[in-house]
Image (tube, coloured by chain):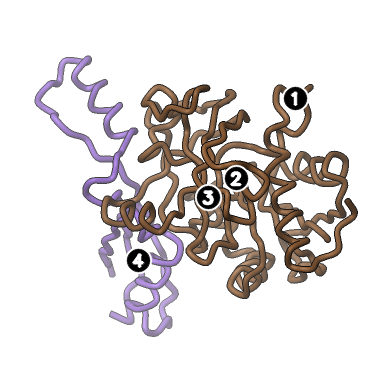
Amino acid sequence: MKFGVVTFPGSNCDYDAYAAVRHVLGEEVEFLWHKSSDLAGCDVVILPGGFAYGDYLRAGAIARFSPIMQEVVRFARSGGLVIGICNGFQVLTEAGLLPGALIRNAHLRFSCRQVYLRVEDNGSPFTLACSRGEVLKMPIAHGEGNYYHFDADLRALEDDGLVLFRYVDRRGNETPEANPNGSRRNIAGIRSTEGNVMGMMPHPERAVEPILGSADGLKLFESVRLACRKMGVVTVK
Amino acid sequence: MADSRKAIVYVRLKEGVLDPQGLTIQKALVQMGYPEFVSVRSGRFFELEIADRAANIDARIHEVCSKLLANPVIEDFKVEKMS
């Protein structure tokens, strides 16, 4: 099994994602350059956090048109597993691979702190190793992570079970105080209708060992490995 | 309007989408002693200079607006052409 981590000009969590996969999860991983048009046979593509193309215009707006993204879109449309973390989530919404948009945090400040997430669905390839309702601790670090969608679209999103993670307090309660950025319905992460594309604002790759404050993020990487193994992909571990 | 030289594109958040920047500016206005400005919505504009011989320009402007300059999920745009 091989992960690919895309490096855009301005990505700054690409090495974190790489290290999480290679050194902690123990699977093969390769960087994918934004100008490349080759996914190098990867089974999973990660769009990492950062400020791709300086986040000029809107976060993710320019990155979406890079050569590698044309391949990522093709890969996603054919059922390939794609994970967007933070800026990667913004890129995925701009590319139309995930519904909604991420706007400026309601309080206008960049927010960098630990949050708690509740796993809303453990049937997806990204949450297989979690249990439903489980509370995970991991950090956020963003200025534009305020998930927005119109009421009718939000209802459809909820009805289709596309919400994977919600901001909660440490006991798992969905409260306004636990919402770090004003996201509608405390939404922290969603999946695509087809289920193979996932985006989240919090950083699982920064929570893969206890020394980092939490190892909960590793569960998402383990989930993806489990999903790949179920699809017949050979894994290291 | 194939002879248009410039187009101005205004992009704003759709009605109903939270505009934290506009809200903060409005609060500042109240604090500064301008309470009559009861709402502020922010946005951005782009000035496009277009080559003389460019064809099909209306459709082309519309295309770049909905593909890049605005995010149609949350934003509306308006085009003004100048010659």
Image coords of residue A169 (percent x, y)? 48, 24
Quick check: marks 4 and 2 in contact, CB under 8 Å?
Answer: no
Residue A37 versus residue A115: which sits nearer the camera? Answer: A115
Q: Are marks 2 and 1 in contact (CB under 8 Å)?
A: no
Q: Using the image, name the chain to which the residue with label 4 belongs.
A: B
Colour assignment, chain B: purple
Residue B63, relative to residue A230: is it above or below?
A: below
Q: Nearer the viewer, mark 4 or mark 1?
A: 1
Please name which of the two marks, 3 or 2, marks the residue nearer to the observer. Answer: 3
Residue marked by disc 1? A212
Whole-Å distance between the Cαs marked 4 and 2? 27 Å
- Give the labeled residue for mark 4: B6
The residue at the point 75 percent across, 44 percent down is: A17
Q: Position of residue A181 (x, y in %)?
A: 43, 31
Labels 2 and 1 within one chain: yes
Dot 1 falls on a residue whose secondary structure is helix
Q: Residues within 10 Å of mark 1 (few under 14, many from 20)?
A: few
**Mark number for residue A54?**
2
Residue B58 locus on image (x, y percent): 32, 77
Which subunit holds the residue at mark 1? A
- In this view, the residue in front, B6 or A22, is A22
User: Gap in Å between the C-alphas at discs 4 and 1?
Assistant: 53 Å
Q: Amino acid at mark 3?
A: Gln
| Residue most extreme to the right | A236
Task: Tell me the quadrant of the picture where the C terminus of chain B can be found.
Answer: bottom left
Q: Which residue is mark 3?
A: A90
Q: Which mark is residue A141?
A: none
Q: SS at mark 4? A: strand
Q: Residue at x 14, y 29 (%)?
A: B37
Q: Residues within 10 Å of mark 4 (few under 14, many from 20)?
A: some
